[in-house]
Structure formats: structure tokens, C-alpha cells
Amino acid sequence: MKQAGAEAAGSTLAIAMVSRLGGRERNEDACGHWGWGKPGQEGPVCCVLADGAGGHGAGDVASQTAVSTVLQSFGSRPACDPSRVRELIDLANRAVVAGQASSVATHDMRTTLVVWLCDASRATAAWGHSGDSRLYCFRNGKLFARTRDHSLYQSMIDAGLADAAAMRGHPQRNVLTACLGSIEDFEADIVAHGVALLPGDAFLLCSDGFWEALDDAAIEAALQKAPSVQSWIDALEQSVARQGPLGQDNYTALGVWYGRAP
């Protein structure tokens, strides 16, 4: 999947996305958006990204199931608030769990998920996630907020047992403590309240294969130099591709600019 760029006519949003195989044989990442790109579109918008896992190639089934469930459900009732984010993530989890029972190949499939909702007409956004796919929010070109990974290494950081600076090279950085694919142990973090948007706000949804190659400073620097959301994602993608090791993971990102030239 290559980028989808160019600002929609009459919209205050600009979106670009990319998804690559890396060094893998199969892309188990998925992403998409609903409600953006139509002339005059000013209603609620949904952006979603997932990174699947599972034996026999079922990771791509898990991620695509989660993304399609979120987009289809959102399309049936577009709304932007934290309760809608939670509902969408819960629906996606149930869909992945149901898919596990459909075949032997999918019985252990799991996926991360990030959901970002926006109502440009009300200048508000809401988001939530499960797993270690991330959402970054930038304001005035600086990191304003970022989701907290549901991972063993992040838990070690929280407990004061590990250094955040060493996360990207640590072998336990990808051991998840939460993701989609379980009813009993399912966990998701949702923003408590809708977030008021300011012109120039930028958002980045990305899988771990993307953020592992980029520290916060590198993402900020690329944002500050970029004349468009498309060029921002292009620059970040080039950095990821250059730094990727042999056997590099799939990497996927979706960028959004609010109230700023495309």
C-alpha cells in the first residue's frame, strides 16, 4: 500500500499513509480511514491501524479483520467521542475472537489496534489503543501526547526496572501485555475526554516496525521541515527503510494534519 495524500476539498484535514513489507514475506499490518476525501466532507472521520500476529500467516487476517470492523461500524454511525472509540475497539476485539474459531490456521491470531476519531467541524478528537502500535500527537511541532505501549518492557520501565532509552534494541520490547484476541484479558486505553484541536496539530499512527527505527526527536524534526503531510510520511518512511535491519518487520504509518496546508 502506498500513500493516500492530497487534502480533500472543503476539509481541514490532510491524510497520508504507507504500509511496507520490510524484510518479511507477508504484510501483517493494515490501516485505513473513513469519512475523509469526499468533496465538502466535514463530518466525523475515523483513522485506524493494526499490526497482526499469529501462526500460519493469520496475523494479516487479524489486522484486516480489526481494521475492516472498525471502519464498517464507524461508517454506520459516525461519531467522535471516547465512548465511541471504546465501542469500536471492543467490536474489533470480538470480531478477532470470532475469527479465531473459524479455522485451525486462525485460532491463535492476535492484533494490536489504534483508533483515532476526529470531528473537524467541532475541532475535537478522541483515540484509544491496545498493544504496542502507537499514536503520537504533535502541537506547535512538538510532541504533545503519545500512547503508552502495552508491552512487558514498558511495564518494566513503569516499575523503574528498565531504561526507556534502551527500548528500541531490547529483545522484550515486542512482548505484549495486551492486544486484541481475548475476551477475558482484553485491555484498551482510551482518552478520558475529547481533545480540543488547534490549527497545526499533527497525528501519527504507526506500527512498531515503524516507530522502532525513529526516536521522538527524529519524528519532530521531520515534521518541522515538512511542507505537507505527504512529505512528512515520505521522509519518515525513507528513514525507516535506511535503518531497517535484515529481516526488518512490516512497517506502517498514517499521518494526519489538522487545520494546516496539505
Image (cartoon, helix red, strand yellow):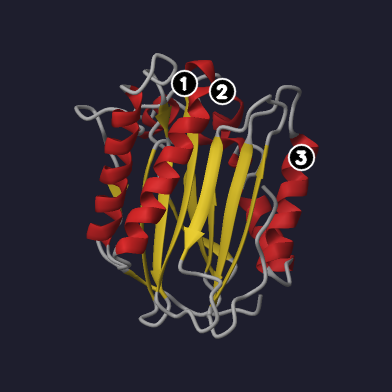
**Residue under circle 1?**
54
Residue sitting at x 33%, y 42%: 92
* Vertical side of 108 occupied by 147: above or below: below
Q: Residues within 10 Å of mark 1 (few under 14, many from 20)?
A: some
Could you tell me residue 124's position as x and y percent? 36, 73
Above or below, comparing residue 89 to residue 182 in the picture = below
Inspect this view and state whether residue 117 appears. Answer: yes
- Pick the quarter of the image with the C terminus: bottom right
Count of numbered marks: 3
The amino acid beneath tag 1 is Gly
Of 161 and 190, the residue lying toward us: 190
Structural crowding at the residue carrying mark 3, measured as other residues with C-alpha within 10 Å and reported as few (<14), some (14–19) or many (≥20): some
Among the two numbered marks 2 and 1 on one chain, the one whose residue lies closer to the N terminus:
1
Dot 2 amino acid type = His
**CA separation in Å, label 2 and label 3:** 20 Å
User: Is 111 positioned to the left or the right of 100 in the image?
Assistant: right
- The residue pinned by badge 2 equals 170
Percent coordinates x, y for residue 145 in the rendering: 44, 57
Horizontally, residue 44 falls left or right of residue 193, namely right
Question: Residue drawn 36% across and 32% down?
Answer: 179
Residue 34: x and y in percent read 46, 62
Query: Which is more N-terminal, label 3 or label 1?
Result: 1
Q: Identify the disc placed on residue 71.
A: none
Which label sits in the foreground, 2 or 1? 1
| SS class, disc 2 | loop
Is residue 108 left or right of 228 when viewed as pictured?
left
Q: Residues within 10 Å of mark 2 (few under 14, many from 20)?
A: few
Examine the rendered structure and indicate whether residue 186 appears above or below residue 31.
Answer: above
On residue 241, which mark appears?
A: 3
| Mark in front: 1 vs 3 | 1
Q: Quick one: SS at disc 3?
A: helix
Amino acid tagged 3: Ala
